[in-house]
Image (cartoon, rainbow, N blue to C red):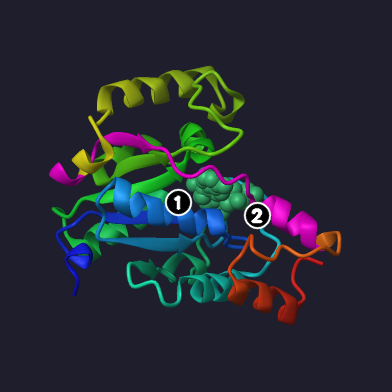
Amino acid sequence: MTPEMSPDRPLGIFGGTFDPIHIAHLRLAQEALDACALGAVRFIPAGQPPHRARPGATSADRLAMARLALAGSAQFELDEAEVLSDAPSYTVPTLERLRGLFGQERPLVLLLGVDAFLGLPGWHRWRELFDLAHIAVATRPGHVMDFTSGAAKSDAGRAALEEEFAARQAPSPDALSATPAGRISHFEMTPLEISATAIRAVLAAGRSPRFLVPDGVLDYIEAQRLYI
Ligand code: ATP
């Protein structure tokens, strides 16, 4: 085991629909490893995402693509539990399950793009997240950390999120390793204006998303004739 994979280092938790998984997801995780001094990042494809319309590919296909994308990266792990479950995917129960696996002391860092972070007030039991994990927010082109933006759903939700953000700010992302949960940090990642929505649109238009997704994922999409 390399020192980076040490079980004492914080574990990054990265959920998403991954429909399909793309290189901005992988870069976010890679850059979070360094920014937050993580030991590993655990990717958790969502089963039935509660916040959005049904994804374009089946759960089995999204899982297969994630497996292909993560193969060969020693610090990336795949958590299949949500995608194999019939229950809707909610983050608080997922974090409770991970606390059961990793104990109460290991820092857990939920990784979110800024768009996802601003949507937190719409999440089931979102304020309980801070009892279970830290949050590290990655920059994303086209989205700014603006609590007045529409993503936060309601005025009350926006105010509550801004309050949590102010009260819980860590001095730097690597300071998250000092405690198991409860702080918020943010980090700049290489700007990549890529989304799964745009990749699905490229495929539906008969064009190739080559170099926007890992080669193995592209081969799978083509072999299974997904998103056309
Ligand atoms: P879709 O277009 O279908 O909504 P997506 O590309 O946003 O998909 P998700 O699976 O919904 O991908 O996102 C998982 C996580 O990855 C979210 O926290 C999201 O903010 C983050 N993310 C996705 N793409 C980027 C990107 N280009 N830059 C930074 N963060 C990103």
Name the residue: 51% across, 67% down: 83
Is residue 62 shown left or right of residue 40? Answer: right
The region drawn magenta spans 177-203
The quadrant of the rendering that contains the N terminus is bottom left
Real-space Cα separation, disc 1 to disc 2, in angstroms? 14 Å
Q: Amino acid at mark 2?
A: Ala
Q: Earlier in the sequence, mark 1 or mark 2?
A: 1
Say which of 104 and 22 sits in front.
Answer: 22
Instruction: Give the label on residue 28, or none.
Output: 1
**Does the beta carbon of the residue at mark 2 sit less than 8 Å from ligand 1?**
yes
Q: In the rendered view, does 32 fall on the left or right side of 172?
A: right
| Residue at mark 1: C-beta within 8 A of ligand 1 | yes
Q: Is residue 89 visible?
A: no
Residues packed near mark 2 inside 10 Å, few (<14), some (14 to 19) or many (20 plus): many
Q: Which residue is mark 2?
A: 196
* Position of residue 63 measured from the top left corner of the image (x, y, whole percent): 54, 72
Residue 104 x, y percent position in the rendering? 16, 54
Relative to 89, say whether 213 is above or below.
below
* Mark 1 and mark 2 residues within 8 Å of each other at the beta carbon: no
Does residue 6 show up?
Answer: yes
